[in-house]
Image (cartoon, helix red, strand yellow):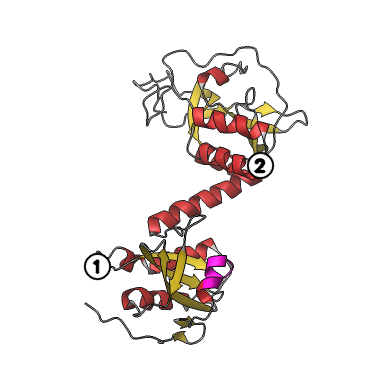
Amino acid sequence: MSQTKKQPGNGAKPAAGAPILNPITKQPVSNPALDKAGKALRENNNPQNLNLVINEVTRSFFLIPATVNWNGSAPKPDQNGRVVLPKDTKITFSVIKSDSGKAYFPAFSCEAELRKGKFPHANQVMLLRFDDYARMLQQNEQISGFVVDPFGNNLRFESPMVASIKQQHDAAVARAKAGLRPTQVKAGDKVTLVEPSLYPDKLLDPLCETLAGIDTVAAAYLQVMLVNDTTRYYLVVLDAPRNDQMLLAVAKAAHAYLTDPERKMEINFTTSDSVLGRQGMRDSEPFYIRGKGRVDNLDEEEDE
């Protein structure tokens, strides 16, 4: 992410009427957490501060001036300041230009930031989210990205970065819906891995069936992970490079087990390119080998 040169506006005002409300909080659009993260990034441009900004950007609502051509009279806004657009309404979103002539969509975090700009042709202010900007950029290659508060924190997101964030965000949402949990281990935690005494058939049979169709997985291992001597998880280690689509497929295969109220433990998944994954493979026998399928090294768990 980079920054555009600030070009002070001439006090342009948003469309007249009641302030636009955040549909979740029912309060005027405001993003204080994003503003704080943006200021921290400007003072210290490091990966930690950048991640804070990205996290806030993906969950924030933004204001953008637009020129809206109605077919007939303009509809009246509701109590939240929102307007239902008639069919065939034409919308042209305002853009700003960098010193090099590149065009960007503005994304204002609040009306105070919006009023710093000048958009003489705009007759409405629209409410957008990160996904809206990502979709607009994908459909318009002439726009180079979007800028959060161009006359304030001035945080510029180029189109390739937006596409990457969108892909990662969508993958994280899909993993959550599929029941794929991140490994619950923090710095300083005591982690002990032990061989399971029983194989859970309801978990491993569908996993092996799915893994047979993924050529990149050479083998798969099952361990019991004990965190701080209190919490137990099944740890499934895939001998393969990390890949979101692969992990999603594995999570879907484990869905029946994850939703079984009689399951004995939650599951964590990792790959051989992680420290935890390499530890889980060390001195362990796989339950799955590519080309062979399931390998029974332990007693099978009896179906209940």
Direction from residue 267 to residue 133 in the image, left or right: right
Q: Main secondary structure of the magenta part?
A: helix
Q: Residues within 10 Å of mark 1 (few under 14, many from 20)?
A: few
Q: Residue, x 47% and y 38% (percent of image)?
A: 59
Q: Residue furthest left?
A: 304
**CB within 8 Å, label 2 to label 1:** no
Direction from residue 42 to residue 73 in the image, left or right: left
Observer able to see residue 249: no
Position of residue 201 measured from the top left corner of the image (x, y, whole percent): 33, 78
Observer able to see residue 223: yes
Question: Which quadrant would the C terminus be assigned to in this image?
Answer: bottom left
Whether residue 85 is situated above or below residue 226 in the rendered picture: above
Position of residue 167 measured from the top left corner of the image (x, y, whole percent): 55, 51
Query: Which of the two labelled residues, at mark 2 and mark 1, occupies the earlier sequence position?
Result: 2
Residue tagged 2: 46
The amino acid sitting under disc 2 is Asn
Circle number at residue 87 = none
The amino acid sitting under disc 1 is Glu
Residue range in magenta is 272-279
Residue tagged 1: 262
